[in-house]
Image (cartoon, rainbow, N blue to C red):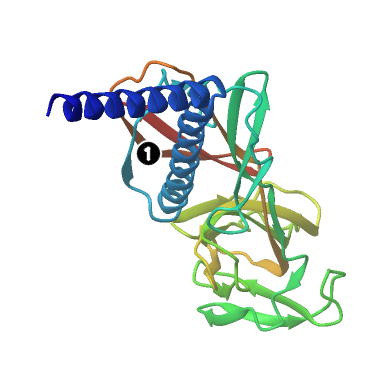
Amino acid sequence: MKAQSETLVFILLFLLSVGLFTVAVFWSKDIFQQNVDMTKVSSAEKFMKDLDYTIKSLIKFGGYEQIDYKVDGPITLIDSKTIEVRTVIPSGISLPRYWNNISSDSSYIRGMLDGDVFRIQLIYPRSIFDTGTLCLEDGYVTQLVGDSWFAPASTSSNCNPLGHYAIDSSTGIIMAETPSLPQGDYYTLIFDELRGDTGQIYENFSVYCGDKVYDFPDDVDGLGWRWKNVTCHFNEGVNNFNFTSTDSESCKFDSFRISRNLDDLEIEFFTEGPTLSKPKTVKVERNDTYIKNNKATIKIRITFI
């Protein structure tokens, strides 16, 4: 009986020794550490996917969302485009240089190593849209209201030999529509208008688009076509806009174009170990959208609680 017990103890000690030796070998080769580090990378990648989806939802629908993410280092908000968290990862770990598109062709994750620091970037490529010059006469006018009419071309314009539309007497309205737009966003509506008759001082009109109204007083001298532009928030698909007379003398219109040129939105993500901190709540809010140099920039407020 005693011999059997000694044999059992010997076997258990032998197995324990083999187990400890195996762990030591794998640990010396950083197998376990690499698995931990790759888990960090996978977690960071998932966070960026969630953040990408949230940002797009906020841009489209407004409001706010919360994202919960367990980080292993401090998060820093650099500016409205950049957040940072750090994780040191051994440079010997093989990492993808690029990920596939994460939710659509409009964004993707890029990963790279900078020394021992692994960096994740969420990239929104520059998005350019331009209809080119369009003639109102080519089916874009949906209705004429009040003192408004179509006149054959008599003054050189972009849409010769067709003609132009006119509004007058504070009652004329040209109701028009856009071509189909790729997504809801802020666009620049550029239009060609004819005013400046020296014998008329009440050629005033307004432009209605989205939820905005833009007034154009009679402050031009010399009859001629001039390009003007306004900023409009249009939805995806076809949208309406109109030119409305606001005084007693006529204003004429014949062509327009719609363009959009968004700066890249790039969010950089860093992680740094080895101490795990408490989970942090990442609160992402759409803050504002402003226009500068005819470019629409979306400001996203990211708050860490």
Which residue lies at the image location 63% right of the left edge and 73% below the top edge? 179
Quadrant of residue 101 within the rendered picture? bottom right
Towards the viewer: 296 or 117? 117
Give left or right: position of 303 versus 239.
Answer: left
Q: Residue 107 appears at what percent x and percent y?
A: 60, 50
Residue located 35% across and 20% down the image: 276
Is residue 164 visible in the rendered image? The answer is yes
Asked if residue 299 lies left or right of residue 65, the reply is right
Looking at the image, residue 55 lies above or below residue 6: below
Residue 172: image x %, image y %?
54, 73
* Whole-percent x, y for residue 155 in the image: 84, 71
Residue type indicated by callout 1 = Glu
Q: Name the spot of residue 226 as percent of width and height, x first.
A: 77, 55
Q: Quadrant of the N terminus?
A: top left
Q: Is residue 81 above or below residue 227?
A: above
| Quarter of the figure that contains the C terminus | top left
Where is 66 relative to 275, above or below?
Answer: below
Residue highlighted by disc 1: 285
Residue reaching furthest to the left: 1
Say which residue appears at 69% left-offset and 68% top-offset: 252
Mark 1 residue crowding within 10 angstroms, few (<14) / some (14–19) / many (20+)? many
Number of disc labels: 1
Q: Secondary structure at mark 1?
A: strand
* Residue 86 seen in render: no
